[in-house]
Image (cartoon, rainbow, N blue to C red):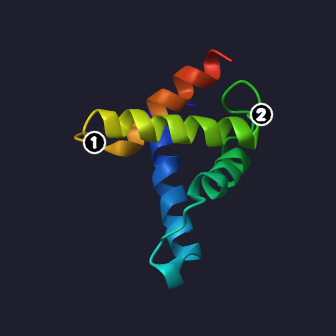
Amino acid sequence: MTTEELAALLVDTGQHHHHAYISSDGTDPEWPLWYAGYLQTNIWDRVGAVPTRSSLVHLLLEAEQRFNATGGSSDWPPFYARFILENLSSR
């Protein structure tokens, strides 16, 4: 899976999440759990192994923290995708 493919999947995930939480305008304090389940289903073994949901939750939260530390000045999907792929390959 390339960074571009995962970035596109993250955008798709966000759209599905927002639709699932339309009544709360997408607000979901547990969003990493939802994203992890959706990503796991769609990534499956395209990253060399099947990542666990808990590892994806951890990576999403860490990507968010690092993205926010940069001031969030770049587009988030490629940032998160690069971070996730780099860290999945090192596990």
Distance of label 2 from label 1 (alpha carbons): 29 Å
Q: Quadrant of residue 43?
A: top right
Q: Is residue 56 left or right of residue 22?
A: right
Tag 1 secondary structure:
loop
x and y percentages locating residue 38 in the rendered image? 66, 54
In the depicted structure, whether residue 16 falls above or below residue 34: below
Q: Position of residue 22 (x, y in %)?
A: 51, 80
Would residue 53 be found to the left or right of residue 82 on screen?
Answer: right
Q: Amino acid at mark 2?
A: Val
Residue furthest out toward the bottom: 23
Viewport quadrant of the N terminus: top right
2, 79: nearer the viewer:
79
For the residues carrying marks 2 and 1, which lies nearer the camera in this image?
A: 1
**Residue located 43% across and 38% down the image:** 65
Q: Residue at x 44, y 41 (%)?
A: 64
Density class for disc 2 (Cα within 10 Å; few <14, some 14-19, many ≥20) is few
| First along the sequence among labels 2 and 1 | 2
Within 10 Å of the Cα at label 1, are there few (<14), some (14-19), or many (20+) other Cα atoms? few
> Can the viewer see residue 1 in this picture?
yes
Residue located at (28% from left, 42% from top): 72
* Residue 58 drawn at (x, y percent): 62, 37
Residue 2 at least partly seen: no
Above or below residue 28? Residue 78 is: above
Q: Amino acid at mark 1?
A: Gly
66 sits left or right of 54 in the view: left
Residue wearing tag 2:
50
Quadrant in which the C terminus appears: top right
Give the quarter of the image for residue 84. Answer: top right
- Identify the residue position indicated by label 1 in the image: 72
